[in-house]
Amino acid sequence: MAIREQTLGPDHPDVAQSLNNLALLYNNEGRYADAEPLYKRSLAIYEKALGPEHPDVALSLNNLALLYDNQGRYAEALPLVRKTISNKTAAIWAALPALLGAQSAKLIAAEEAIDDSLNVVQRASQTSAGQLWFARK
């Protein structure tokens, strides 16, 4: 990380990619407190460098939503999932568990969780880009 930051600068998209990958490792290890600031920094770099519609921004949003879902922080995951749904970039592996968790925590009605989940699955199954979201994680 230090070499990449020194070589490319702290706000380069490749630095964001490294941050995201390290956060993913920490998330998989259950080191959520270590992963969260890395995901947030990665997201901020991607948004600034690439714009809010870029696929790497979508991946970061989905990863952060999954992190919150893993911790049962559905109130924080839900706005991220809603943003990816509205941008048509929701990943099944992030959106569905977060929607179910939000519904279980009574943050959204069951009907809304079902409608949003169906939207995510239909979108993913109908587009070639959506097919990639099935496999990404």
Image: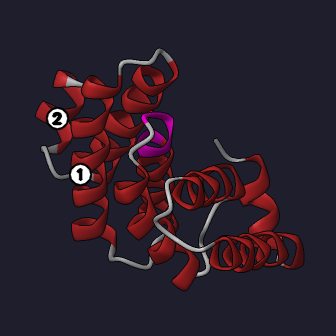
Question: Vertical placement of 9 versus 75: above or below?
Answer: above
Inspect the magenta stretch and tell me whether residue 83 lies in it. Answer: no
Question: Tag 1: residue type?
Answer: His
The x and y percentages for residue 26 are 40, 21
Between residue 101 and residue 131, name the one nearer to us: 101
For the C terminus, the quadrant is top right
Question: Vertical placement of 30 versus 83: above or below?
Answer: above
Question: Tag 2: residue type?
Answer: Glu
Question: Vertical placement of 47 versus 68: above or below?
Answer: below
Total numbered labels: 2
Instruction: Please say which color scheme the image uses.
Output: secondary structure
Magenta region's main secondary structure? helix
User: What residue did someone put label 1 on?
Assistant: 12
Q: Residues within 10 Å of mark 1 (few under 14, many from 20)?
A: some
The x and y percentages for residue 27 are 44, 27
User: What residue do we see at 61% from left, 80% from top?
Assistant: 88
What is the C-alpha distance between the residues marked 1 and 2? 8 Å
User: What residue do we see at 58% from left, 53% from top?
Assistant: 104
Relative placement, left or right, of 81 versus 22 is right
* Mark 1 touches mark 2? (CB < 8 Å): yes
What is the secondary structure assignment of the residue under circle 1? loop
Residue 5: which numbered mark, if any?
2
Relative placement, left or right, of 126 versus 41 is right
Corner quadrant of residue 48: bottom left
The x and y percentages for residue 112 are 64, 79
What is the secondary structure assignment of the residue under circle 2? helix
Question: Vertical placement of 74 versus 33: above or below?
Answer: below
- Provide the residue span drawn in magenta: 67-71
Inspect the magenta stretch and tell me whether residue 69 lies in it. Answer: yes
Return the residue found at the far right. 125
Between residue 93 and residue 104, name the one nearer to us: 104
For the N terminus, the quadrant is top left
